[in-house]
Image: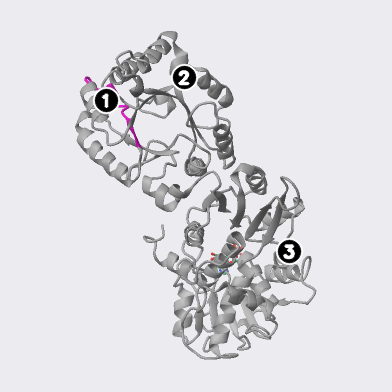
């Protein structure tokens, strides 16, 4: 079973008591090994008493590491000195469970190699309590060109009990190589990728049978980039329930660090009792990065990728890629030219074959959120009053909203402001539900292009009504609903404090929907409520698209209201 090793840095003898106390808290939290990283302590005049105490009082079996500066550590002394320290510790009772020495150090000198071998097979050690040697190799810059040769050399070293390789990931694909190394291991092994792209290798170490993964102590930066805390591993990434059969899902985008989707879908998998994990999967913005990375993730069968949420800037890339792969693009995604969901079906079309399918859950989610408000408004230009759409947690409603031709959107006139990706999905969703859609945009040519696109390739047989609006028409008083699909009002966007249209556009008794969901209460949401509109905030659409997506991923609905609770309770649902 893969263990969590918490990496504790101790630079000076005075830090030993607090380090022991901190390590005890980490062990209490779930760490099963403590790595004492004593690079600077080892350089002090008399490090042994402090080191002996760390080993003797360690709250869990420990690794002692004196990492050289060349491999990302802080130790600048001689190899002989640090190996002598490790040798002295290995001869003690109790001794460290492991000491870590770099392969490069062993290869620098035959004398050192002999000394290391002696250290871990010390005659004074009881046979069953010997200290194991972790032979390690790190590249803080990139994947080393001779990675395979390094692993082979470590395996071939008779004194090596554990092979450890770590390198800075250049993309998500490096994780796959770490998993391949773990699957082919000839000795107990740790294979980790560092940095933002390396998180899957740290979390899925358990799925692929690593001996351990490293965690950083709570509140500390950690000893390598990308280390999660013990708590993050266990609560956020469901460490305790991961295993060889765990299915992977995730969100692909750039950036994805802010995405709430992992919190939602992992809570859904917990509730459904499914052996599945959902991770943020950062993929740089280019088509080439998307194609290469998603292709590699899908093709790496042991990963068992079940599906992906796809967000900006890759929604168009997804449709293009699935078409190129001969997969199935659903009609709404085909018409929009973009999709937010990839489903990977394995073994359906023959041995080892993979079926790829897109789904666009943004479009029906927007339509359903709007339909709910129109229904609640009691008809065209109906009841006044603010409030977000109710029943957002019911994906069944979302489905019905897009399939029925007599639903609340049928025959309604919807004005959409904006002509980007969100506008396309909202326009398609509303048109599919039978609404007449008029698109207004700062750059009018893009509104024309949007209308043309939705009537072009992939448009459904039943014609959609989507046209570009003329200047001044937004305030004509002929719309039942106005939808903001611009980035105006978005936190971090171009105009976070502004309204997406002129303040004199009448809103009384209209449904006003904002697709912007960060913040939930945008300037438009506040303003429209104050003007007597029935308001739908961006979270209503966001929750619905996630619920529809979850149903595709899990084959069942998330419990009603769960996703809403997750969004409002970051502590309860990490
Ligand atoms: P996008 O493709 O970049 O399009 C941005 C749109 O905003 C364009 O039409 C652009 O007009 C317009 N715009 C930008 N700055 C403006 C300004 N200062 N004044 C007027 N118009 C301006 O963005 P997107 O992907 O469609 O996303 C739009 C919003 O929808 C974002 O806030 C996103 O978070 C949200 N969204 C929400 C959900 C959900 O589930 N709730 C789902 C998807 C997206 P030009 O064409 O003239 O540049």
Tell me: residue 61, above or below residue 414: above
- Mark 1: give few (<14), some (14-19) or many (20+) Cα within 10 Å: some
Query: Where's the N terminus, which quadrant?
Result: top left
Tell me: residue 574, above or below residue 118: below
Mark 2 → mark 1, Cα distance in angstroms: 28 Å
Magenta residue span: 33-46
Q: Is residue 315 visible?
A: yes
Q: Residue at x 50, y 84 (%)?
A: 534
Q: Are marks 1 and 3 in contact (CB under 8 Å)?
A: no
- Tag nearer the camera, 1 or 3: 1
Considering the numbered disc 3 on the image, is that residue within a helix, a strand or a loop? helix
Between 148 and 185, the one lying in front of the other is 185
Mark 2 → mark 3, Cα distance in angstroms: 54 Å
Q: Which residue is mark 2?
A: 104
Instruction: Tell me where residue 57 appears, x and y as whole percent.
Output: 23, 32
Instruction: Tell me where residue 157 appears, x and y as whole percent.
Output: 49, 17
- The image quarter in which residue 465 lies: bottom right
Considering the numbered disc 2 on the image, is that residue within a helix, a strand or a loop? helix
Q: Residue at x 75, y 50 (%)?
A: 325
Counting labels gives 3
Q: From the viewer's perspective, is 35 left or right of 500?
A: left
Q: Which residue is mark 1?
A: 94
Q: From the viewer's perspective, is 38 left or right of 190?
A: left
Q: Which residue is mark 3?
A: 334
- Mark 2: give few (<14), some (14-19) or many (20+) Cα within 10 Å: some
Give whichever of discs 1 and 3 has the lower sequence position. Answer: 1
Between 94 and 466, the one lying in front of the other is 94
Mark 1 → mark 3, Cα distance in angstroms: 66 Å
Is residue 62 covered in magenta? no
Q: Quadrant of ligand 1?
A: bottom right
């Amino acid at each position: 079973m893969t263990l969590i090793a918490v990496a504790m840095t101790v630079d000076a003898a005075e830090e030993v008591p607090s380090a022991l106390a901190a390590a005890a808290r980490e062990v209490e939290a779930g760490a099963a090994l403590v790595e004492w990283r004593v690079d600077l302590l080892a350089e002090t005049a008399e490090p042994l008493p402090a080191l002996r105490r760390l080993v003797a009082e360690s709250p869990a079996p420990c690794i002692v590491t004196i990492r050289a500066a060349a491999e990302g550590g802080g130790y600048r002394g001689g190899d002989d000195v640090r190996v002598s320290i490790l040798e002295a510790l290995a001869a003690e009772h109790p001794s460290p469970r492991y000491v870590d020495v770099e392969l490069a150090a062993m290869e620098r000198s035959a004398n050192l190699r002999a000394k290391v071998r002696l250290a871990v097979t010390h005659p004074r050690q009881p046979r069953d309590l010997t200290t194991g040697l972790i032979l390690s190799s790190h590249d803080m810059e990139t994947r080393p060109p001779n990675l395979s040769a390094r692993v082979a050399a470590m395996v071939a070293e008779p004194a090596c009990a554990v092979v450890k390789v770590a390198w800075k990931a250049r993309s998500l694909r490096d994780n796959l190589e770490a998993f391949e190394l773990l699957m082919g291991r000839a000795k107990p092994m740790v294979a980790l990728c560092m940095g933002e792209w390396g998180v899957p290798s740290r979390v899925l170490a358990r799925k692929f049978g690593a001996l351990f993964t490293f965690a950083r102590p709570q509140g500390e930066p950690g000893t390598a980039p990308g280390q999660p805390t013990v708590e993050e591993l266990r609560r956020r990434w469901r460490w305790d329930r991961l295993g060889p059969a765990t299915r992977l899902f995730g969100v692909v985008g750039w950036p994805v660090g802010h995405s709430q989707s992992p919190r939602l879908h992992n809570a859904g998998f917990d509730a459904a009792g499914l052996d599945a994990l959902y991770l943020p999967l950062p993929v740089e913005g280019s088509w080439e990065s998307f194609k290469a990375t998603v292709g590699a993730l899908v093709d790496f069968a042991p990963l068992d990728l079940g599906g992906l949420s796809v967000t900006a800037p890759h929604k168009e890339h997804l449709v293009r890629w699935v078409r190129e792969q001969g997969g199935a693009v659903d009609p709404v995604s085909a018409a929009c030219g973009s999709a937010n969901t990839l489903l990977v079906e394995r073994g359906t079309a023959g041995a080892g074959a993979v079926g790829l399918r897109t789904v666009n859950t943004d479009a029906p989610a927007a339509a359903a959120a709007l339909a709910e408000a129109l229904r609640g408004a009691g008809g065209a230009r109906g009841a006044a009053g603010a409030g977000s759409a109710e029943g957002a947690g019911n994906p069944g409603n979302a489905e019905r909203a897009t399939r029925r031709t007599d639903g609340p959107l049928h025959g309604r006139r919807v004005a959409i402001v904006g002509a980007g990706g969100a506008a396309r999905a909202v326009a398609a969703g509303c048109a599919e539900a039978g609404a007449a859609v008029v698109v207004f945009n700062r750059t009018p040519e893009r509104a024309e292009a949007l209308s043309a696109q939705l009537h072009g390739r992939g448009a459904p047989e039943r014609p959609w009504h989507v046209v570009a609006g003329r200047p001044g028409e937004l305030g004509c008083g002929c719309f039942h609903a106005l939808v903001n699909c611009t980035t105006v009002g978005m936190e971090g966007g171009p105009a976070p404090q502004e309204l997406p249209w002129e303040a004199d556009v009448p809103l009384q008794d209209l449904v006003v929907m904002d697709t912007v969901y960060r913040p939930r209460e945008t300037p438009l949401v506040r303003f429209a409520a104050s003007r007597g509109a029935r308001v739908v905030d961006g979270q209503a659409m966001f929750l619905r698209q996630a619920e529809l997506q979850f149903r595709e991923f899990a084959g069942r609905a998330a419990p009603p209201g769960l996703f809403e609770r997750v969004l409002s309770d970051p502590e309860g649902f990490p």
